[in-house]
Amino acid sequence: MGTENGYAAFGAGDEQNTGQPAGGSPSLAATGMDRIAPAVAGYGPNRLFVQRVSVLAWTVAATVAISLFLRLPTVVFTLNALGSPMSIRISETTVIAVFIALLTASGTERAIRTHPLYSGDSSGREPELGGHTWLFWGLPAAVSILAVLLAPEARTPLFQAGAALLSGGLIAIILFNLYASVDQGSAGYRQARILLNVLSYTAALALFLLVYQTRTRSLLSGTLIAATSALLAVELLRDIMPRVNVVLMYAALVAIVLGEAAWALNYWPLSGASGGLVLLLIFYLFVGLARHALHEGHLSRKLVLEYSAFALLALVLIVLIGPGL
């Protein structure tokens, strides 16, 4: 089913995946996505996948653009938490962020479902991983939320339009690489996995910085950071272990550690940048340890010492350099 050069021309890929004649299918170049699709031997993106990615990318871009002009009344909820009052503000940014996260997760689900290893194929092959395509939701949802939160920082209409288009393009890039990461035996799996890892850690850092700089109550900020950590940890761990319940258990452990760390850091006189970097360091260390534990089945003393030494060195650098950021 594969080709010698990874991706074949899109018409050829459509013929092999859908059984339709190649002459009636648009090319990847015609859709503008040929440059962002990774090389995947065996299961190249079919026409339905490209169509769904295109629709989702433009929808995300339009939603980000609309969020720049939408104005809704802010609702404030006041409640007593742990013996003291706490206020929760629901603004238009909050509403749009939740909406675009759900929208992106739904679009990701529909796109990944087109992969033969999840939808089955003409030979009757069963879907892989029991059809748990929701494991792919975390990174696209996190990036779409970041787009809504960061787009207002663009000061001119031209830059705001560029930010909206960039957010849609980034979602498309992520989905093509998520598609490539479904089949670990494909030629493009390794490159796709590296890019997804980089984007996951970058998204984690950005969200940690945004949440920590608000200096909101630990109950709220810790919960948000824990939820972010869980979503992105699932993306970073999902390809190590086929047993979904084990992946979720390790992702939950990472989330608990990050939530507790955020709670403790709120009492330290750290700058916003230093706090975000410390949270990223903790996230990186515990996800790394989880990946090794899932892959090897245990953690060696040498590995723990290596990670501990790295953590100590990174922490010293953050303390020395962080206050100046």
Image (cartoon, grey):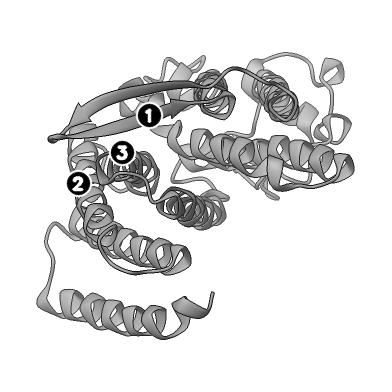
Q: Which residue is mark 2?
A: 256
Q: Can the viewer see residue 279 in this picture?
A: yes
Residue at the spot x=42%, y=23% of the render?
76
Q: Can the viewer see residue 120 in this picture?
A: no
Disc 3, SS = helix
Looking at the image, tell me whether mark 2 or mark 1 is earlier in sequence order.
1
Give the percent coordinates (x, y) of residue 288: 29, 62
Disc 1, SS = strand
Vertical side of 315 occupied by 12: above or below: above
Give the percent coordinates (x, y) of residue 150: 64, 44
Mark 1 residue crowding within 10 angstroms, few (<14) / some (14–19) / many (20+): few
Residue 13 position by quadrant: top right
Label at residue 88: 1
Mark 3 or mark 2, which is nearer to you? 3
Amino acid type, label 3: Leu
The answer for how far apart the CA atoms under marks 3 and 2 are is 14 Å
Mark 3 residue crowding within 10 angstroms, few (<14) / some (14–19) / many (20+): some
Mark 2 residue crowding within 10 angstroms, few (<14) / some (14–19) / many (20+): some
Disc 2, SS = helix
**Of 162 and 149, which appears nearest the observer?**
149
Label at residue 220: 3
The answer for how far apart the CA atoms under marks 2 and 1 are is 22 Å
